[in-house]
Image (cartoon, rainbow, N blue to C red):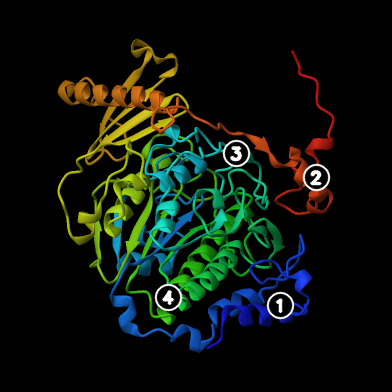
Amino acid sequence: MTDFSTMRCAENKVRGYNCLDNAALDTNGWFNPMLHRTTALAFCLATAVIPQLIHARPLAAQQTGRPNVLLVMADDQGWGQTGYYGHPILKTPNLNAMAANGLRFDRFYAAGPVCSPTRASVLTGRTHDRTGVLAHGFALHRQERTIARAMQKAGYATAHFGKWHLNGVRGPGVPVLASDPHHPGHFGFDHWLTVTNFFDMNPIMSRMGAFEEFQGDSSEVVVAEALKFIEQTHHDGKPFFTVIWFGSPHSPWVASRQDQIKGEAAKSANHHGELVAMDRSIGTLRDGLKRMRIDQNTLVWFCSDNGGLKGVGHDTVGGLRGHKGTLWEGGLRVPGIIEWPAKIEPRITSHPASTMDIMPTLVDILGLPRNSMLELVDGMSIKPLLAGEIGPRTKPIPFHYQGRAALIDNALKIVAEKIGGGKTGQRKYLLFDLKADKTESHDLFTERPVDAQRLQTALEAMLVSVAKSRTGADYPAGVVTREGPHGRFWYAIPEYQPFLKDWAARPEYKNWANRKSRPKKKRQR
């Protein structure tokens, strides 16, 4: 049996490094000075894994015991950007296959209309404003109880690959520092290969604080690395909890020539080309699980972190109202699929669900202790839905973002605008029936006064509850013991200063790395 250290030694030799040079190896067995360059061979090695490793465990092993869990999330993919919804130029054959083999949600919601808030909700089961993550670039409170920590305590090997964006750092993604007080390890991840924010072609990433530069599309890089982790964990006989958060199709859009869609303008060709590569990487991931014969008892939950973008050449939201950054359906509704062949018969559901449901559902499926979560969570377990339709949702889905709020109660949605200052009289309310009016064009607030009053009361109670949570009332200490830091730009953080000159030539950093040295412009009065 080939062990993982032998595999790593072989890879180090491929890179031109001597396995006996112990001073050059990190604690995980990789040759790893602060920055080194790997090659596209890493992707090939992960997809052409050693047969003995893949087939080491009998097929029966995947039919019993706890499931493996994979959470996969796109970055800025809109609800309409899949082949199964008839996008005009995107085919997404691998997402289509996943949807055809699992539970496809036609009404799945990101908890926030931008990236960091939704990521906080995935890990905690709570609306993001309770967790310290008010918007992008805010740090997740260390007092939150996360699904990664719960899985870790339950004996799962836990890992995070890709975009993090829960450490209060802004700007294009850079490798997360080992000294960062909010890196993934502080929230329950045993292993992490991570960047602070979005990342593109040939990314520089952080493996547990050590910087590595890769070659190739960012989606394929993180899937290749995740498969290595999954292989080793499977070989060790442990279940895994793996999070893959892509950097695509977030700007700046840089797709390989082979993935750019012919006939499209440059922006559209690159934006949609990133989704072509991301979809291909999902196929690689699914194929890897099958080769290891663990696909049947692996739960894969796919979604996006917020609604689609404007101005990228084609409609991203499937005709819905609004885009990323809004609380309209186009800013919140996203693709959603759960694939778990051992338990889920393929079908499509219109039952509303959200990223806040992920943690409660996994806690329920795995029988984890209720105190794995904080007492107040906004999501609910949708475990019964995996077996068949269950009727109306029993818990509304709340949204709160920068002075606006909304609440979805099955077909009805109430939206509150201008909630700043907390004065009810200054708020403007709108009510929509999403079953009859998916574009949110016809306000029913005055036409359906009973529903309007009921949902207005529920929404206002939610706002009061969120305000209380922001003081730390949900935590055992009763206060927030560590707030932030929030909103730091990485180029101003001292530990990144030595890299600014080298990074300035990279397309994702060139407009950022020189900012610190630019003279500040005088404000025009």
Identity of the residue drawn at 28% across and 76% down: 63
Residue 354 versus residue 226 in the image, above or below: above
Disc 4 to disc 3, C-alpha distance: 36 Å
Q: How many labels sit on residues? A: 4
Q: Earlier in the sequence, mark 3 or mark 1?
A: 1
* Horizontal and vertical percent position of residue 403: 45, 24
Disc 2 to disc 4, C-alpha distance: 42 Å
Which of discs 2 and 4 lies nearer the camera? The answer is 4
- Indicate the secondary structure of the residue bearing disc 2: helix
Residue at which label 2 appears? 497
Residue at which label 3 appears? 168
Identity of the residue drawn at 53% across and 59% down: 190
Which of discs 4 and 3 lies nearer the camera? The answer is 4
Which of discs 1 and 4 lies nearer the camera? The answer is 4
Residue at which label 1 appears? 12
**Amino acid type, label 4:** Gly
Whether residues under marks 2 and 1 lie with C-beta atoms below 8 angstroms apart, the answer is: no
Whether residues under marks 3 and 2 lie with C-beta atoms below 8 angstroms apart, the answer is: no
**Amino acid type, label 2:** Gln
Identity of the residue drawn at 40% across and 68% down: 239
* Horizontal and vertical percent position of residue 355: 37, 47
**Amino acid type, label 1:** Asn
Whether residues under marks 1 and 4 lie with C-beta atoms below 8 angstroms apart, the answer is: no
Disc 3 to disc 1, C-alpha distance: 34 Å
| Side of 233 relative to 397 (left or right) | right
Q: Earlier in the sequence, mark 4 or mark 3?
A: 3
**On the image, which quarter does residue 258 sit in?**
bottom right
Residue 294 versus residue 409 in the image, above or below: below
| Side of 442 relative to 280 (left or right) | left
Identity of the residue drawn at 60% across and 56% down: 194
| Side of 206 relative to 139 (left or right) | right
The circle on residue 237 is: 4
